[in-house]
Amino acid sequence: MVSSDQRRRQLAREKFERQQQRREEARRRTRRLAVIIASSVAVVAVIGAGAYVSLGDDDSKTDAAADASPSPSPSASESSVPEPAMKIDKKSKYAMSLKTSQGDIGIAMDAAKTPHTTNSFKALADKGYFDSTKCHRLTTQGIFVLQCGDPKGDGSGGPGYTIPDENLTALGKPGDDGSVTYPAGTVAMANTGQPGTGGSQFFLVYKDTKLPPSYTPFGTMDGAGLKAVKKVAEAGVEGGAGDGAPKKAVTVEKATVDKA
């Protein structure tokens, strides 16, 4: 017999997948609209008229209404710049340090297991990409993560490129429900629900969480960092919901990535 706790986790995972699908559908609608408008602008240009077209972000509305999986970042078709050139030592260990408004979070990274992810975070951190950004999302029911890395602060931002999934077998074989356990302390990549769509958003697991093995696990928090995230989780979500902005706001003041 399925216990109430197992049923709650199952419902949470199903909600995750539905929200991922809605986000991806919203992106497709936005891209189709962009093509239509671009075509219209081209016609106007041919007849000698000029126009400036500004598209709103459809995802911001979708994410506000359906904000539930560790996602999103740009899908592969939305990438506008290339992935950073590989500059790290792929045989070395790296350490990411997040100085936040709620305490310092140290993250150990193994470049041998996640070279693309480590290299991307190193490149982004070196140019201050994560500095002064908010951890925009906390989940406290069924799935237990704090999500960060979006410069927009609404779950729709990314660096303009995507990186491949890595290390997906590290957490073992999926169970009968298709999930694996992401242990407390794990740091993993968010994505749109489609393969190879990681960008800059990542999530910090503060309590063992069952998820499909499709989110690159690339780091492990130190004890102080895990304790800090747990305190944020204990304060809850704004509005009393189980998924949304954390009541105890978290700002990444400075992020660095260096050889360990």
Image: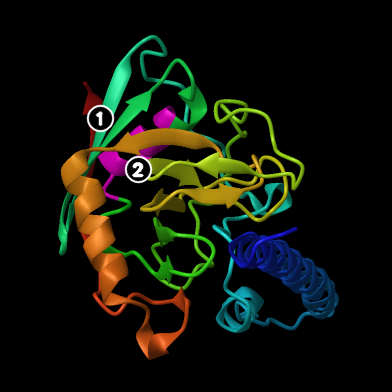
Please give the name of the residue rendered at 55% of the width and 37% of the height, measured from the top-left corner. Answer: 216
Report the magenta residues as a range. Answer: 118-128
Say which of 123 and 117 sits in front.
117
Q: Quadrant of residue 187?
A: top left
Residue at image coords 47%, 77%: 242
Identify the image quadrant of residue 137.
Answer: bottom left
Left or right: 218 in relation to 259: right
Q: Is residue 183 visible?
A: yes
Task: Kindly identify which residue carries mark 1.
Answer: 95
Q: Is residue 190 above or below residue 51?
A: above
Circle 2: residue type: Gly
Bin the neighbour count of mark 1 within 10 Å (Cα to Cα): few under 14, some 14-19, many 20 and up. Answer: many
Q: Nearer the viewer, residue 53 or 170?
A: 170
Q: Main secondary structure of the magenta part?
A: helix
* Pair 2/1: label in front: 2
In the rendered image, which residue does mark 2 sit on? 185
